Amino acid sequence: MIEKPGTAIVVDRPEPLAGHGEVLVRVARAGLCGTDLGTFLGKNPLVSYPRVIGHEIAGIVAAAADGVSTVHEGAAVAISPYKNCGACAACQRGRPNACRNNQTLGVQREGALAELVAVPANRLYMSESLDVDHLALVEPFSIGMHAVRRGRVSGDDSVLVIGCGGVGAGAIAAAAHRGARVLGLDLDDAKLSLARAFGAIDACNSASPSVAQWIADHTKGEGPDVVIEAVGTAATYRFALETVASCGRVICVGWVKGDVPVEVRHIVAKEMEILGSRNATDEFADVIALFESRRIDPLRLVTHRVALVDAPAMLSEWARQPTAVGKVLVSVSA
């Protein structure tokens, strides 16, 4: 639990009970991402304190309540952490991922970095061949895959992904799977290596003075057809607008706190499309299928593994050295 910004502790809570239509899951693995770090640092505007974190979750079904027939005890599952209201404009349009009243585990409501969690059965995704390590990485990859879907990426497109962490890696893998020519951009050379492993034809350090020429060389001087922004800074968003090709698409994934000043002339002159991309929907099943194909190894993202009792110390270390930590995988149970 993040008790307050800068303070994480392990606490005892009563064991949850599964209500009608719910399943009790024994959590095995939980991924920590930039959202959790932002919550720890007090920089997540969607969080109130204290807050139990944890939204990248995999576990084993311990019990199913009345009204559940789709899962069985002992099944390995990934959990979709989102909860929608069903009544707002987004939900009525069949896009519950963008629900105005969305409640994500570990963000707007108590999370699942715990030994047991009760969740609706329709939020579970199963695999007969993936282990819990892989299943814990389905959620971040699904967000990247949703961004690719929003961008209508095809095999005819060149795609630039800005930010090659968990979400960016998912976007790279999904775009490459569609046959696009994918480029990766990041400040971390280790993440650039991962971008290539996940399907990017090339990757470049964004601190390089020749970035613009590198992009031009790979896009015949036109710029990428699609730019996926998965960082969330004013500078990277401006760069996306400046770099995308005429009549291209900019997909906004990174969450920016505050305003981003932009030159509207780029938007008008290029007649570009700017598309928001939030959370994910049935991409969970698509990501599981991609993992099951063994075309990529998502575990290459993991830089640190810790036990539940060591998670608070891991967050403190991450806060001190943000560039030294990539994906953290917390082992909650065997």
Image (spheres, helix red, strand yellow):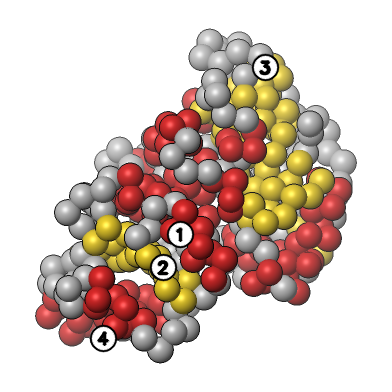
Residue 91: name its quadrant: top left
Residue at which label 3 appears: 74
- Please state the horizontal and vertical placement of residue 42, each as a whole percent of the image: 68, 69
Pick whichever, 321 or 62, lies toward us.
321
- Kind of residue indicated by mark 2: Ala
Q: Is residue 314 visible?
A: yes
Labelled disc at residue 195:
1
Residue at which label 4 appears: 263
**Mark 3 or mark 2: which comes first in sequence?**
3
Residue 196: name its quadrant: bottom left
Distance CA(mark 2)–CA(mark 1): 7 Å
**Mark 1 or mark 4: which comes first in sequence?**
1
For label 2, the SS is strand
- Please state the horizontal and vertical placement of residue 145, each as a whole percent of the image: 38, 47
Q: Residue at x 79, y 33 (%)?
A: 333
Quadrant that contains the C terminus:
top right
Q: Nearer the viewer, mark 3 or mark 4?
A: 3
Residue at which label 2 appears: 203
Q: Residue at x 43, y 39 (%)?
A: 295
Tags 3 and 4 touching, CB below 8 Å: no
**Mark 2 or mark 1: which comes first in sequence?**
1
**Mark 3 or mark 4: which comes first in sequence?**
3
Q: Residue furthest bottom?
A: 209
- Please state the horizontal and vertical placement of residue 278, each as a whole percent of the image: 40, 53
The image shows a total of numbered marks equal to: 4
